[in-house]
Amino acid sequence: MPTDPQLFELRALQAMLHGLIRVRMMQFNPDSNLELPDLVTMFAGKQADLWFPIPGMIGGFQIRLIQSAKNELIVFAESGSRAWDGWMRHKVTQFNVCSDQCEDYLTEPDFDEWIVGQLQSSKR
């Protein structure tokens, strides 16, 4: 189980992630009762990766929970629809969400390479 400070951080991080998911899936008329990912359960189960499909989106979210070298919890996510708006990459912290549109998905670094680049740039 996470410690109390980690639990607080996970809940804040989860609130930001859930906001991102809700905004991204609004255009697809989602089921308002859709159960969103639980980061506390992921962390407690030592599950770092999760695929979260969005009904009607023909896609969803690839979610990765990372503990940085600075001991911060960060979510990196890739979201998109194969039929609608392409793919985006997101870095979620307990304080903000940064998103980048993938211009040409085939020439972009793969998800793992992108995460490594994001972590390295945050060390500077």
Image (cartoon, helix red, strand yellow):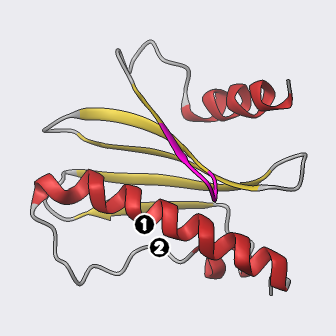
Q: Measure the C-alpha gap from mark 1 to mark 2.
A: 8 Å
How many neighbours does mark 1 have within 10 angstroms: few (below 14), some (14-19), or many (20 or more)? Answer: some
Residue 50: x, y in percent?
52, 62
Going 39% across and 55% down the picture, which residue do you hit? 20
Q: Is residue 64 above or below residue 2?
A: above
Residue 42: x, y in percent?
64, 74
Q: Nearer the viewer, mark 1 or mark 2?
A: 1
Going 56% across and 34% down the picture, which residue do you hit? 111
**What range of the chain is rendered magenta?**
93-98
Residue 46, image quadrant = bottom right
Residue 37, numbered circle: 2
**SS type, badge 2:** loop
Q: Type of residue at label 1? A: His
Mark 1 lies on residue: 18
Residue 84 among those drawn in magenta:
no
Please report whichever mark, 1 or 2, sits nearer to the chain's N-terminal start.
Answer: 1
Q: Type of residue at label 2? A: Pro
Chief secondary structure of the magenta portion: loop
Q: Is residue 29 above or below residue 101?
A: below
Going 25% across and 32% down the picture, which residue do you hit? 86
Q: Is residue 58 above or below residue 82?
A: below
Point out the residue furthest to the left here.
Answer: 29
**SS type, badge 1:** helix
Residue 9, image quadrant = bottom right
